[in-house]
Amino acid sequence: MTKESSTAKVSKGDIVHVEYNAYLAENGMLFDTTSADKAKEAEIFNENLTYKPLPLLVGGGRVFPGLDEALAEAKVGELTTVEIPPEKAAGARDPKLVENIALREFFRQEIRPEIGMEVNIKNRVGTVVTVTNRMVRVDFNRRFAGSALKYEFTVLDKVEGDEAKVMAICEMDYGSAEGFRATIADGKVVLYLPDVCKYDQKWLLTKYKIVADLREVFGAVTVELVEEYLKKEDKPVEEKPAEVVEEKAPEEL
């Protein structure tokens, strides 16, 4: 691991913002980045992704173990390069996880398999390796299993302040902190939810991650998730002035 510069130390349990570039160590192929320019240059740009520094809970197990270890030894503002062996990245490659599956199984799910496609088949996620008239060969190993990886990363800052940490956790787990509010006192975290959480299916799964991370960071025994329903005030009805109808006498015959 090589480093440049020196400043504040990062520790396990810190919430930090990180920018990084991730490569296959064997050939230098960029496969992930927080930089839109780098992604476009490597022709891996995805318009559905947001390219910006990511919030991470150091030691939280959200990244490969080797990267988590390197983050826990990093310093804020320092460029760090680390090569991660397979056992601390995606793990060893298991030949038994490469299987042949009948093409008709894909057609039943209305999937037209192509080489390199990621598929969910028989409740497992894998990558299509080959396709024939009758069989599809699928690799169910984790992506990059058996490969050494290289990361170049910089910890931009450590998140300070209780409310800022709560918002960073929301962004880390839910993808956005917009609309959230929080109060923290006496070992209790109260998180007020934006309206979108009331009908977002993603929130139903994400909330458990957020609760777990809040407990880890704050040592909170109680976490309250609050949905607010505010009564809309009825708009006063404007009274229109009564129309004056001029009565005319019947014409004399």
Image: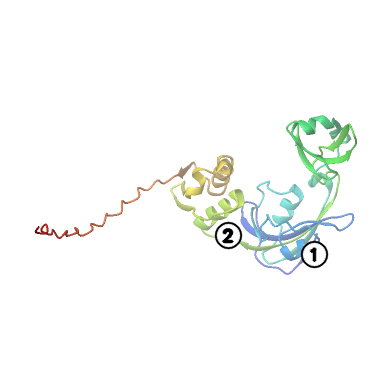
Between 50 and 186, the one lying in front of the other is 50
Q: Gap between marks 2 and 1, in whole Å? A: 31 Å
Labelled disc at residue 41: 1
Q: Amino acid at mark 1?
A: Glu
Q: Amino acid at mark 2?
A: Val
Residue topped by disc 2? 159
The residue tagged with tag 2: helix, strand or loop?
A: loop
Between 169 and 48, the one lying in front of the other is 48
Asked whether, in this view, residue 237 is left or right of residue 88, the answer is left
As drawn, 116 above or below 244: above
Asked whether, in this view, residue 250 is left or right of residue 198, the answer is left
At a point 68% along the width and 67% down the height, the residue shown is 77
At a point 59% along the width and 49% down the height, the residue shown is 174
Residue 228 placement (x, y as % from top left): 41, 46
Between 23 and 188, the one lying in front of the other is 23
Between 233 and 80, the one lying in front of the other is 233
At a point 74% along the width and 47% down the height, the residue shown is 65
Pick the quarter of the image with the N terminus.
Answer: bottom right
Disc 2 and disc 1 in contact, CB within 8 angstroms: no
Asked whether, in this view, residue 218 is left or right of residue 124, the answer is left
Label 1 Cα neighbours within 10 Å, binned few <14 / some 14-19 / many ≥20: few
The disc, 2 or 1, on the residue closer to the chain's N-terminal end is: 1
Asked whether, in this view, residue 250 is left or right of residue 60, the answer is left
Residue that protrudes farthest toward the bottom in the picture? 5
Residue that protrudes farthest toward the front in the picture? 253
The residue tagged with tag 1: helix, strand or loop?
A: helix
Residue 38 placement (x, y as % from top left): 76, 64
At a point 81% along the width and 61% down the height, the residue shown is 42
Labelled disc at residue 10: none
Q: Is residue 149 visible?
A: yes
